[in-house]
Image (cartoon, helix red, strand yellow):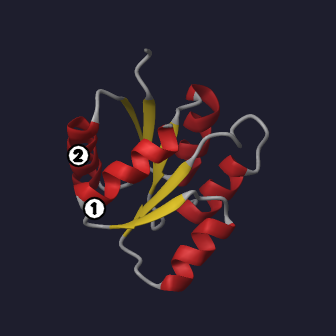
């Protein structure tokens, strides 16, 4: 079975490392990183990962807009996007889903919450 490829889109090196470490506890994944929404959209198109973990608050293109572009573009619409953010309002969760996200996690991410969402998205 081929390794699953996960793209992390987040401008915080600390958060990227934390997610990478947690993903390593879940399985053996190929990990790519983008540091803003624009780079995330480009890498989604170039790499066609199996899953994207998307922050919301980033310089330039935010995660909501990047998610919308990824999920509404024919080439990348099949890629599940899981929002991972510090924003905790229910309205943010609802807006993320309306942009096409398959789920929503708050930072700091709990491994017990991340694992089933990643497994479901990659199933």
Q: Residues within 10 Å of mark 2 (few under 14, many from 20)?
A: some
At horizontal 59% and vertical 59% (from top left) the residue drawn is: 101
Question: Could you say where residue 88 lies in the image, as x and y percent from the top left?
Answer: 40, 80
Label 2 and label 1: CA atoms lie apart by 9 Å
Residue in front for this viewpoint, 86 or 58: 86
Give the mark nearer the N terminus: 2 vs 1: 2
Residue wearing tag 2: 22
Residue 122 visible? The answer is yes
Quadrant into which the N terminus falls: top left
Secondary element at image label 1: loop
Residue contact between numbered discs 2 and 1, judged by CB atoms under 8 Å:
yes
Question: Could you say where residue 96 lies in the image, as x and y percent from the top left?
Answer: 58, 68
In the image, taking residue 103 as reference, residue 22 lies left or right, namely left
Question: Could you say where residue 42 lies in the image, as x and y percent from the top left?
Answer: 61, 38
Residue in front for this viewpoint, 25 or 42: 25
Question: Could you say where residue 3 lies in the image, as x and y percent from the top left?
Answer: 40, 21
In the image, taking residue 98 as reference, residue 54 lies left or right, namely left
Residue wearing tag 1: 109
User: Which image quarter: residue 61?
Assistant: bottom right
At horizontal 25% and vertical 66% (from top left) the residue drawn is: 108
At horizontal 48% and vertical 65% (from top left) the residue drawn is: 56
């Amino acid at each position: 079975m081929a390794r699953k490829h996960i793209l992390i889109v987040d401008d915080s090196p600390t958060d990227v490392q934390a997610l990478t470490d947690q993903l390593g506890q879940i399985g053996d994944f190929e990990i790519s990183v983008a540091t803003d929404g624009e780079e995330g959209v480009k890498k989604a198109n170039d790499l066609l990962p199996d899953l994207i973990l998307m922050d919301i608050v980033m310089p330039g293109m935010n995660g909501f807009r990047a998610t919308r572009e990824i999920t509404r573009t024919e080439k990348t619409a099949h890629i599940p996007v899981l929002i991972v953010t510090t924003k905790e309002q229910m309205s943010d969760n609802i807006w993320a889903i309306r942009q096409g996200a398959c789920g929503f996690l708050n930072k700091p991410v709990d491994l017990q919450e991340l694992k089933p969402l990643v497994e479901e998205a990659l199933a």
